[in-house]
Amino acid sequence: MGDIIQLLPDHVANQIAAGEVVQRPASVVKELLENAIDAGATQISLVLKDAGKTLIQVSDNGKGMSATDARLSFERHATSKIKRAEDLFQLTTKGFRGEALASIAAIAQVELKSKQEQDELGTCIKIKGSEVESQEPCVTQKGTVIGVKNLFFNIPARRNFLKSNQVETRHVIDEFQRVAIAHAQIGFSLHHNGNELFNLPATNARQRIVHIFGSKTNEKLVPVSEETELINIEGFVGKPAYAKRTRSEQFFFVNNRFIKSPYLHHAVNAAFEGLLPDKAQPSYFLFLSIDPKRIDINIHPTKTEIKFDDEHALYAILRSAIKHSLGQFNVAPILDFERDSSLDTPYDLSKKEVQVPQIEVDRNFNPFDTEKQAASQSAAKAMAFNRHTAKKNVAWEALYTQIDEQLPETKIEVESEEVTGNLFGQQQQDLSGDSVFQLQKKYIVCPYKNGMLLIDQNRAHTRILYEELLRNITVKAAVSQQLLFPLSLQYNAIEVDMLSNLREHLEQIGFIFDSIDTSEVSISGIPTLINESEVSILLDQLLADFEHEIPDSGFLQTDVFAKSMARSMAVKNGSVLAKEEQLAIINSLFACKEPQICPNNKKVFVRLEVEDLEKNFR
Ligand code: ADP
Ligand code: MG
């Protein structure tokens, strides 16, 4: 193979939308991986140091470059991939702008070694800030190794603008995963600071996804396959039961190129309509193949957005293809009148003995005996409350014990200036259950000296938990409950990375981790404030809240953390609260530093003064 690179004519170059190629290490990674794929490599390895800030190295076993091509590859608009404007509309390669290497060489120290199969020797070129420092023949393998050192070394402002290593690494892993999922037939590896993060053998699409997202992924994937004249759709969607709260498993590829499309995302969501719990995100890995003439990839410089010429049709096809798969694999409800309904009885239930409904009568009940009535009523309440806590909410237990210790006479002690003074009247009104009640399963109503308070139960509880979590993190270690059997949860590499970054916080509020490894997290203790069954929802929400933005400052990080946890742990509107729970909320709320507002700055309660009420009666 001889020299193949040509300079693009200016007018073609101008047709290519201009844009910043390199924003961060991840953009370099994307360009280099794509070049290796375009070169026909079957094995590609990526090595990083310090999130790519110090070194990004990509080695491939592709076709390599001649000495002339190697030199020319660093010229702007030098590409072997298109020759004429018309070629833009029939792209089959990843690259076509011929500006990636030129841009990278302008802002880093680059060393390139490349050799074509038939050549004895390869070429080694060193470039620093667009200046060629050396070019000489060298001994090297067939293929190309390109090392990019000290990104933005000559633009300090850009270098300072880079995020923490954690965040930049996550962006790199994102790009790496996208490319790796789109090219299952190519082997990939990723090493960071000497640690192997991924080693993905060449395989099929399904196995590739499983290798990346963990072995349990296999059982949740439902294949999707649809051929139409306009488009072919292949790939997988996650069964609704496995849906997560994060959007980390949502991938569209068009002609093997990762793209973002809110419109197509909407089509997928529409197919899942009614199958997912609130806020849950469907997983999808969808590969669309479409005639390159029908799309324009050129509208966005970083090339994750594309334009289709018949979006409406695409939407409909995609939605129905997914609906079909979900139905076919029995994960969506199906109407089938010929089905023997006895088959639908769950196996366990059909064996179970039927219990006769029982009625319990309180023979001592006398509606005119007020004292007894009160006693039996409160006993019933206590029972109901016990059932409630045992079944559902361990959080309350903690809340009560704390209150019992602190407030033996349920007196209300308030620190806050605004609420101090005699919120509850001179005589420190005793908030016994009778004066407090719940309205619309949403508000707690309680009297205070000149009127009443209407407390939003969810916001109040969020405030209480938020302050308690902050206290646990900053002042004292929280109490854990040991789990009988450690809980093991599956996460993908990005999520595992985020969890290990948040590990310290999680431990401060009472989580005990046995291990956090590449795809699995094992938990042997959890905060007394939460229930075992809530752990995965809680962590999912946490990951969703932190997605891509773990704040750099420790304080902000703690704050986002406490807010996220408080939000998912707080009692929801619509939950019935026992009297004791209502009282506990009121008491704990007014022991808070800022009872008036919840952590996201919304009002927790309103006061209705008798005076104001009276205006309504005039
Ligand atoms: P583009 O990929 O848009 O053509 P680049 O600046 O990324 O532009 O690369 C310029 C040219 O260098 C490519 O067209 C290709 O011919 C050559 N090239 C870059 N990387 C490799 C590689 N890993 N193996 C072989 N050739 C490469
Ligand atoms: Mg390229």
Image (cartoon, rainbow, N blue to C red):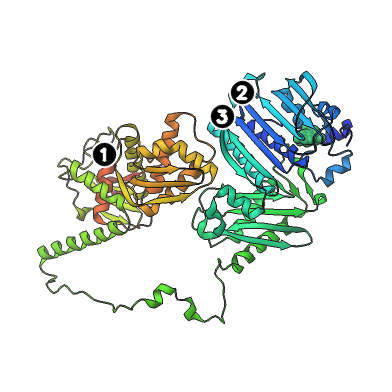
Three-letter code for the amino acid on which mark 3 is drawn = Lys
Q: Earlier in the sequence, mark 2 or mark 1?
A: 2
Camera sees residue 449: no
Instruction: State which mark lies toward you, 2 or 1.
Output: 2
What is the quadrant of residue 6 in the picture?
A: top right
Compute the Cα span from label 2 to label 3: 9 Å
Kindly identify which residue carries mark 2. 159
> Dividing the image into 4 quarters, which one contains the N terminus?
top right
Three-letter code for the amino acid on which mark 2 is drawn = Arg
At horizontal 55% and vertical 59% (from top left) the residue drawn is 219
Q: Answer left or right for 407 relative to 568.
A: left
Frontmost residue, 152 versus 219: 219
At horizontal 82% and vertical 36% (from top left) the residue drawn is 117
Kindly identify which residue carries mark 1. 591
Q: Which mark is residue 224?
A: none
Kindly identify which residue carries mark 3. 163
Compute the Cα span from label 2 to label 1: 46 Å
